Amino acid sequence: MSNLKLNIALSCSVLALAFSGFNVIQTKLATSPVATQVYPAPAYQSTEQATQYHVFANTANEQTQDIAALLTRIDKLESRIQALSMEKSEMLSEQAPQEFESLVFSLIEKREQQKIAEMKAENPIYGFYEDLPEDYEMRIKTDPEYAGQVSNELKQKILNSSLPAAERLAAMSQLQMNMFMLNRNDLEQYDYQAVESILNMTHSMSDEKLRLQALELVSRTPIVDERLSQSFVKMLEQEQNDYVKSLAAEGLMSQYFQSGSDPKQQKKIAQDLLSLYENAADPKVKAILKNLMGDERMLEELKSQSNG
């Protein structure tokens, strides 16, 4: 910007000098006998006239020299303007690629931020992933103290009923992710208390989409607990939403398979499944369970377990 101002100032100077010079030429030549330099004064001129002639001739000569100096100065100013213009062009040519590159990266970053914001809005319970440090997974796997601290903080968020539902669900999802990162099927902080907190939260949620995501998390929990099994039974019997019924059926079947190490608990879950299959008032429940079982072999296994 400073170069541009200098160029303008120099251009104005040149124009001012040029107009000044041409005005001098016009005025002086019109009022002085410069032509006498070309056509000598006649011999009959008086002494006074001859003296005036020499004065005017000397004045004209001085003016000619001034004009020549003025023109020389104009030439120098024009040369300076050209040099500055070239310098400015070179500077712009050097800066342009850098400015363009900076603009491109800025637009890319802005677009990435928009995508992240859209993803968080679309699926808020998994939006936390974008905010994790780059070395998060490695630290979870190699630093037990760090993993324990993060997991404790996440559980406190899950249990905090004053936090927004989306934030509590995100904490639950992250805690589950930590467990998978450690290649484990259980985690001290990921217990029935945490799952129950999320399950109870779904009873008063107005956001149906968020509620379904919460129930999806609960139905796929690796936690095996009789209280959780009964919650799934209750959902199958009372829930109006068919998708929620299917989630409850998946959760109950998951409880059955994961309880293999506890025959007594597995028997109880098998009995619940058979009772729902054979006696449910809503025919949709039987259809959902039949589709989940796949074939008669699963039904025979449940009968065998319930009688064993």
Image (tube, rainbow, N blue to C red):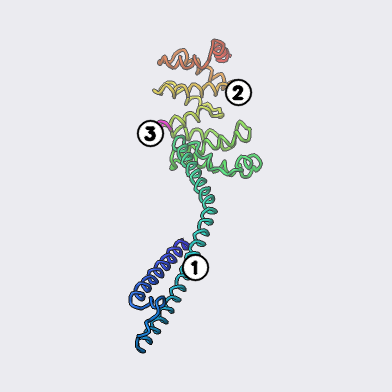
Labels 2, 1: front one:
1
Of residues 243 and 1, the one drawn nearer to the viewer in this rendering: 1
Residue identified by numbered label 1? 76
Question: Residue 237 is drawn in which quadrant?
Answer: top left
The image shows residue 212, relative to residue 60, as above or below, that is above
Relative side of 200 to 306, left or right: left
Residue identified by numbered label 3? 206
Question: What's the residue at 35%, 72% (across, down)?
Answer: 26
Using a 10 Å C-alpha cutoff, classify the residue at mark 2 as few (fewer than 14 neighbours), some (14 to 19) or many (20 or more). Answer: few
Q: Are marks 3 and 1 in contact (CB under 8 Å)?
A: no
Labels 2, 3: front one:
3
- Which element is circle 1 on? helix
Question: What's the residue at 53%, 54% (across, down)?
Answer: 95
Given the image, on which type of amino acid does mark 2 rest?
A: Asp
User: Which residue range is magenta in the image?
Assistant: 203-209
Any part of residue 111 in sight: yes
Relative side of 188 to 60, left or right: right
Of residues 168 and 110, the one drawn nearer to the viewer in this rendering: 110
Using a 10 Å C-alpha cutoff, classify the residue at mark 3 as few (fewer than 14 neighbours), some (14 to 19) or many (20 or more). Answer: few
Using a 10 Å C-alpha cutoff, classify the residue at mark 1 as few (fewer than 14 neighbours), some (14 to 19) or many (20 or more). Answer: few
Relative side of 28 to 106, left or right: left
Of marks 2 and 3, which one's residue comes earlier in the chain?
3
Q: Position of residue 130 (x, y in %)?
A: 53, 40
Given the image, on which type of amino acid does mark 3 rest?
A: Ser
Q: Residue furthest front?
A: 44
Question: Residue 264 is drawn in which quadrant?
Answer: top right
Q: CA distance from mark 3 to mark 1?
A: 80 Å
Q: Please tell me the numbered disc located at residue 262.
A: 2
Labels 3, 1: front one:
1
Q: Position of residue 162 (x, y in %)?
A: 43, 43
